[in-house]
Every structure is written in structure tokens, then in C-alpha cells.
Amino acid sequence: MNPASLFLVLILFTAAWAQEPTPVEGEPEEMTLADRIWLSGQINIVNQSHPSFHASYSGPNSFRQGAEQATTGVATIYTGFRLGRNTEFILDLESARGAGVSGALGLGGLPNLDAVTDPTATAAPYVARALLRQTIAFTKKTEPATRNPLGLDPFLPATRLEIRVGKMSVTDFFDLNSIGSDSHLQFLNYAIDNNAAYDFAADSRGYSYGVLFEFYHPGWAARFAEMLEPTDPTGLTTNWNVTQSRSENYEIELNPNLIKDRSSIFRFNSFVNHADAASYEDAVNGYLSGHDPTPDLSAHLKRGLENFGFGVNGEQELTESLRVFGRLGWNLGSKEAFQFAEADRTLALGADSGGKRWHRDQDRIGLAMAINALSDAHRHYLELGGSSYLLGDNGLRYSREKIFEGYYNFRLRHGVFLAFDLQHVRSPGYNANRGPVWIFGLRLHLEGEIHLE
């Protein structure tokens, strides 16, 4: 069965289950309007600036040497409707503007996850998510669940299969971390909030079409997603030729009890991409042979080129307030990077704490670091003066990129948060001839939910 046929079968399978709702113990017999509908929104505004810094030379995709500042804004309306006890439909509308400092170029780890990386994108509203969620119970034992924009059911079977079909973000479900995943309330840098070596399928806004399976059992969970790739790294067009362009994503989540009464979570994930892309080795060989005047990825596009990678993600609660986390990521690094970061190997470590000790229970402080590295082929391409998705200094004296970040998030009142953020980047863009650079950030986050009675 080819991927297109499989995708259709899965949609029909989900629709069939939607006609057979399964009641579970613990849930009220009648759903009220408030139970059925979700309506909320958020606005996230980030201003970042940096002073001038040393750079021996610069290129077309360099992080800008001169002092600059930039503001980004993302507004989202989250809506959801429970079609039945086990079936939900999610539809989110979003608007994003602002490319951030240096036009979101020049760093392996993007300093602001809200930056718009597509230079042709407008601030017009667009559909961010449109998906159907079906829950299949394998037990009558239930557990309470926190209602949120991606899940409206207040009770879930302890052992269950969840199927989602439609438009979504892979990082809504994979490589999650309660300490470093939410750039609207936590860290801002991509390499700290995500596995920078995870080249997940998405358009330039971070979304794609596909199907997701999640199996939950007490103590562990497993996920698989088949997603569609974009036609190119910086665009919004989806490649619907699933025989040559798609991404398989896998994750196992374990919940061991390492410290009594303290949460421990470990996630092991991998991906395999098939996309119309170019390899760094082909671009280097084309230049060294004299065929290409400069190293040029676009001159060596191949259909269905494969890339794969692995990741480990862990978090541990130490006290009532203090938590630590870490990520380790690796990918093959032979083909051009597609999404939001250029890193073939990455390590991130960090911690956060609530403000209970200084009588600010809803405040949060976080400190983290990330070290990013390139594969030999990726490195050689940039050393020869090539430009890629985010990088291009017209040369490179290679060094690992090191990112340090700290933030303090103030809860001013219900739904209103103000954060101060500071990042220090050494060898920006993996270039020891540039930097270091300090990046100062200020973030205002507003959120609210409408409760229907």
C-alpha cells in the first residue's frame, strides 16, 4: 500500500470510530455547552536588541554586526468543539509578523521562536491548526485531564489510543518538555525550547498536514506521525507527492519514579525525512570540480532525498519548585536543513524554578545553555563560502556555537505576563571569527479563555 492510500484509509478509519462514541467512567452523563466548546486567545510580543560586536567579515546570511533591534508579534485564536464524548475538532487561526533581529538569519539556534522566517509571508491571518481528534478507550479506568486548546476532554481513559488527522505542528506532540518548550512563557531560543537537530516537517510557519497516533498506558506512551514536507525550506507550499516527500516521526515516553513523589519523564524520538532537497557533498563537489562558480545547494536538488536523526529529552522535578531538563540531538547532516535551525548535533541543559521562595508563586525564572555543532559535509560547504537556509558568512573558521540564556517571567495579573530575557552567543553561526554577541529581550504575553455556561 502506498503512503497516499494509507493516508486515506486512516482518515476513513478515524471517521468510522467517530460514529461510535464510547462513554467512560467518571465523566458526567450529559455534556454542557461549556464541556463541548473551547474558545481562547493569546498575543505574544517580543522585542529583541543587540549591541555591535566584533566580526572579521560578513556574508549574505550573517548575523548583523551592527547594533539593531526588532519586534515580533503572534496572535492566535484557539477554538475547539467536542462532536461526541471521544471526538473533537480543533480549528486555530493565527497571525504572525516580524522576522526578528538580523531577519532570523546568522545563528544555528534562532534567538526568537516567533520570528517569521519566510521573507514573502504577510501578517494576514491563516489557519494554523485544523484537525480531528479521536480517542479510543482500552479500559474503563479514567484519569483527570487538564482541558487545553489541543484537548477538550476533562477525563481520559488511562489506556487509550488517540488519533489526530489534519493540519498541526509536530512539536505540539513530539519532543515536548514542561521546562523548555513554550517560548511564550519560558525560553526564547529555538535550540533550548526544541531539539535543534530535529528537522521536523513543517512549512515556514511551523505547520504541516498529516496523521498522528498516540498510545497511552500508565507509565509510558508511544507516538507515530506521518507528515507532509514543504516544497522548499523557506516556503508555505506543501508537497503532496507523498511517495517522494514525507516525514516519519517516532517517540517513546517513559515515566520512571526516580525520586519519590517527584515527576520524571524521558522521551526518545527519531525521524526519517524524504524531501526534495540538496546534499552538501554534491554542492561541494560541484564547486571544487569547477562546474559551479560558488557552492550552491539549489544547483543540486534531488527528489526524495533522505535524512534521519535521533533525540533524547528528559526532565526531572527536584523539589516543589525546582526542575531540571536536558536534550541531546543528532541527525545525519548530509542534506540541507529545512526547519528553523541549522544544527546536526545539539546538547541543551537547563533548569527553572517557581517564585514561591520570594513570595511570587506565579513567577518563574530559568537558566539554560545549548551547544550546537555541524556535520563535516555541512561545515565544509560553509567553509568554502556557501550559503544555506539560515547561514552564510562567505567563509567560516569553524567552532561549535554556544548559547546561554536566562529569563525571568513576571505574572502581572491573571493572563498577563512580562518577561526579561538575556542570551549570550559565542561563535554565532559556528564562526570563531565573529562574536560573541549579547541579545536582550523583552516579552509581553496576554492570554484569556471565554467560559460558556
Image: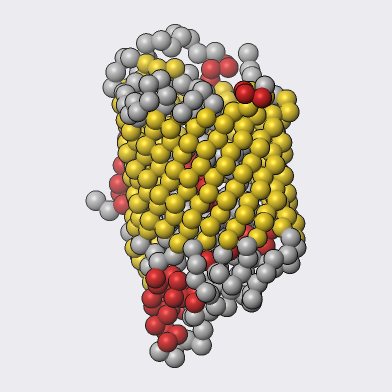
Residue at far front of view = 357
Residue at position x 63%, y 27% in the image: 355
Foreground pick, 147 / 320: 320
Q: Quadrant of residue 428?
A: bottom right
Residue 166 visible: no
Q: Quadrant of the C terminus?
A: top right
Q: Is the residue 75 above or below the residue 340 in the image?
A: above
Q: Is the residue 140 above or below the residue 164 in the image?
A: above
Residue 363 visible: yes
Colour approach in the figure: secondary structure
Foreground pick, 430 / 116: 430
Q: Position of residue 55 (x, y in %)?
A: 65, 72
Residue at position x 46%, y 39% in the image: 325
Foreground pick, 342 / 5: 342
Q: Position of residue 393 (x, y in %)?
A: 58, 74
Residue at position x 63%, y 62% in the image: 436
Q: Is the residue 37 above or below the residue 399 in the image?
A: above
In screen coordinates, is 232 left or right of 414?
left
